Image: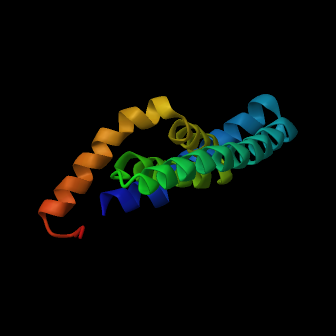
């Protein structure tokens, strides 16, 4: 419940505040161009990184390896792409962080821990 409050109230309010501040500081047109540039550039990066993650997943499945990290990378890249397409500076920074390996390597243990916790609770079943 607390995540919904953050996702639907706090983040959009902060985004609007930053966009208004940026519009007043650097102007409306540079702000709009920056938003468009991050959206198009982010879509391109997400496509490239997503293809790499798909190839890695396919290779792991072909050699009968567990696809664990490849699946987590694919999910992170998917959400990073969505965040980059959304207008705003906070979502763009979060999306960019999810597209690159370094930040994903930092985030991955938290995701794995969350998945194990859900498995122990019986909310996620892997067969």
In depth, the one of 25 and 69 nearer the eye is 69
Residue 109 percent location from the top left of the image: 29, 40
* Colouring method of the image: rainbow
What is the x, y in percent for residue 101? 49, 33
> How far from the left and from the top, in percent, is residue 121?
13, 65
Q: Please state the horizontal and vertical placement of residue 115, each as a whole percent of the image.
A: 25, 55
Q: Is residue 27 left or right of residue 88?
A: right
Q: Residue at x 79, y 41 (%)?
A: 37
Residue at the left extreme, as displayed: 120
Q: With 41 as the anchor, is 69 left or right in this view?
A: left
Relative depth, front residue between 35 and 46: 46
Foreground residue among 77 and 82: 77
- Residue at image coords 44%, 37%: 104
Quadrant where the image shows the N terminus: bottom left
Would you identify the image quadrant in which residue 125 lies? bottom left
Is 3 situated above or below 112?
A: below
Residue drawn at point x = 54 percent, y = 45 percent: 14
4 versus 108 height, above or below: below
Viewer-proximal residue among 124 and 90: 124
Q: Residue at x 23, y 70 (%)?
A: 127
């Amino acid at each position: 419940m607390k995540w919904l409050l953050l996702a639907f109230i706090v983040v959009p309010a902060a985004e609007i505040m930053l966009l208004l501040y940026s519009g007043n500081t650097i102007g409306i047109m540079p702000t709009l161009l920056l938003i468009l540039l991050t959206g198009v550039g982010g879509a391109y990066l997400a496509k490239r990184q997503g293809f790499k993650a798909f190839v890695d997943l396919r290779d792991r499945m072909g050699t009968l390896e567990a696809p664990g990290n490849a699946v987590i990378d694919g999910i992170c890249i998917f959400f990073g792409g969505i965040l980059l397409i959304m207008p705003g500076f906070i979502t763009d920074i979060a999306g960019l962080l999810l597209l690159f390996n370094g930040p994903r390597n930092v985030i991955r243990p938290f995701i794995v821990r969350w998945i194990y916790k859900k498995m122990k609770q019986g909310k996620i079943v892997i067969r």
